[in-house]
Amino acid sequence: LRPGRFERKKSIMYAIAFLAAVAAIKSGVEMQARGPNHYQKLGVSRASNPLAIKRAYKKKSLELHPDKNKAEDASDQFDAIKQAYDVLMDMELREVYNKFGDEGIKNNKRYNENQFLVEVGIFYVTWGLMAFMLTLGKKSGEARNWTFTGLVVMLVLEIAIISSSGNPLPSWLFPTWTEYEIVWLLHSLFPAFMNGCRSLGAFLYVDLDAQSRQLLLALQEQGKDVLLVLRDVQISIQSMHAGGTIAAGSTTATAVPVGGGGPMARATPTGKLKELQDRLQTSNTNVAQAVKQLKNDGNKGSSSMGFYLMIIGYIVISYMFSS
């Protein structure tokens, strides 16, 4: 999006919508390439009981039997639903398939706490280092906070999903997806999330150093205005003393110009002080606004540490209770 083409809020909304659309298309293409899982092959949900699975298998077997199905890959389709039925009817294999997918069935994988923690640690440490490297610099400060927040939330979700004895997800949420596919989706969306955080962080970045310089320049200009007005007051007072024209309570003074001529009106010290007061009020207003904005921008990330401590505490407590 070209800078300045849309309003700031609209630009942010359009950017988020665009990034979400790209991530959805990418994940959809990858999911399509993976093909249907065992639940989708039989047309059942992950909450289906063995009786519902058996009924669905009988219906599918009649439809896809090579004697009735004239497709070239009829035999492969029938074998696929037979394999899905065998896995889902065996409760132990079904649990392995839900947690680890087809690779877990092929490798006869079982949930091992130490192995799981090692695999999770490798993945998240790798992505954490990559995210840290990609968010170096002042402009990426907020993006780094958002990225690591997403990483921690994803870690909590993955631990809760994989370490639970059953399926912790509600039945209405992706009813035909396994826990393994939910975790895969989280891993697939994280790069897009990280790049989105980097883009938005750079767009929303506020340079505190530049604001500090502007504040100092404003103070410097204020000091110059004060000195100029005080100098004018001093010159006026000296001129009035020299001409002997100061009158108590007067608002103007008469000064005889060099070379003769008529009297000329000149501002009194009272008028100069009034001008000085007006300038100071205007300058103080600008400085106060700059200071307020500087404080607000500087305190944006002050609550991040508390959030991270809360997440880490939740992980520790969950691990202690699950043990």
Image: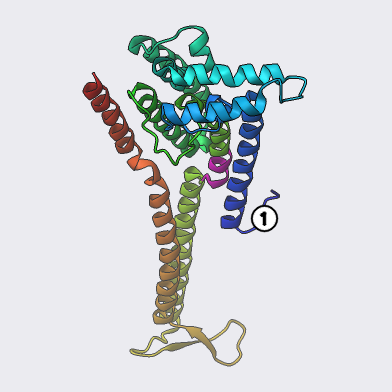
Residue 124 appears in the picture as rendered: no
Classified by dominant secondary structure, the portion drawn in magenta counts as: helix
User: Which residue matches tag 1?
Assistant: 4
As drawn, which residue projects farthest toward the top? 107
Q: Position of residue 213 (x, y in %)?
A: 49, 47
Image quarter in which the C terminus is found = top left
Q: Name the residue rendered at 36%, 32% in the picture.
A: 168
Amino acid carrying mark 1 in the image: Gly
Q: Position of residue 263 (x, y in %)?
A: 55, 91
Residue that appears at 36% across and 11% down: 112
Residue stretch rendered in magenta on the structure: 199-205
Residue in view at x 63 percent, y 42 percent: 21
Is 216 rendered above or below residue 147?
below
Seen in the picture, residue 1 relative to 139 is either above or below; the reply is below
Which residue is more in the foreground, 196 or 40? 40
**Residue 80 falls in image quadrant:** top right
| Nearer to the camera, 279 or 192 | 192
| Residue drawn at point x = 56 percent, y = 25 percent | 37
